[in-house]
Amino acid sequence: MKRFILWVPLGLFVGFALVVAIMLRNPSEPVIRSQMIGKPLPAFALPPGIAGKPGLSSRDLAQGGPRLLNLFASWCIPCAVESPQLMRLKQLGVPIDAVAVRDRPDDIKAFLERWGDPFQRLGLDPNRHVMIAIGSTALPESFIVDGKGIIRYQHIGEIRPEHIPELMRQLERAQ
């Protein structure tokens, strides 16, 4: 009986570990959506991420038609993975602006030289203030902002080729 009692804590721990592993692998809500969808962008003004390209402010995104706002970093591997799709969206005529999160101008410049530069404006968010304010949880992440500065759609994770049709539909809806 004493041997059995010694194994009970180990059995409970293994059972608990299995439950946690299953929940992490198959969460009931796999993503956390921004609470800012349908709301105006918070006011911000970011300095340029690299020399020769304008910085980005919330006012820039509240003029004209809908735009894609991409949050990325040069150190982010999925951000490099989505680069060809951003270049494709640019070829399709989509205006794209970016926020470089926790990055350095030299690293951003090298990233854009290697993977392409689809951005019209690029603001530097060294302390993640804008990222947090718009409800972004990880990089890369993209938002469609209508011409009045209202966030209309959130794409979590890297943009893959199969996501382009949905992004184009959402841009059309944001007109």
Image: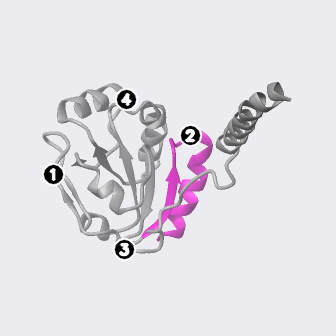
Q: Are marks 2 and 1 in contact (CB under 8 Å)?
A: no
The amino acid marked with disc number 1 is Pro
Query: Which of pointers 2 and 1 lies earlier in the amino acid sequence?
Result: 1
The amino acid marked with disc number 2 is Arg
Reply above or below: 51 against 1. below
Tell me the mark number nearer the camera, choosing from 2 and 1. Answer: 1
Disc 4 target residue: 115
Which residue is at the front of the view, 174 or 33?
Answer: 33
Instruction: Tell me the number on the disc at residue 160.
Output: 2
Q: Residue at x 23, y 64 (%)?
A: 44
Residues shaded magenta: 151-175
The amino acid marked with disc number 3 is Pro
Q: Do the residues labelled 3 and 1 touch (CB within 8 Å)?
A: no
Q: Is mark 2 on a helix, strand or loop?
A: loop
Badge 2 local density, few (<14 within 10 Å), some, or many (20+)? some
Provide residue 72's location: percent of width, then percent of height. Answer: 36, 42
Q: Is residue 18 left or right of residue 155?
A: right
Disc 1 target residue: 47
Disc 3 target residue: 40
Provide residue 46's location: percent of width, then percent of height. Answer: 19, 55
Quarter of image, res 135:
bottom left
Farthest residue, direction right = 1
Query: Which of pointers 3 and 2 lies earlier in the amino acid sequence?
Result: 3
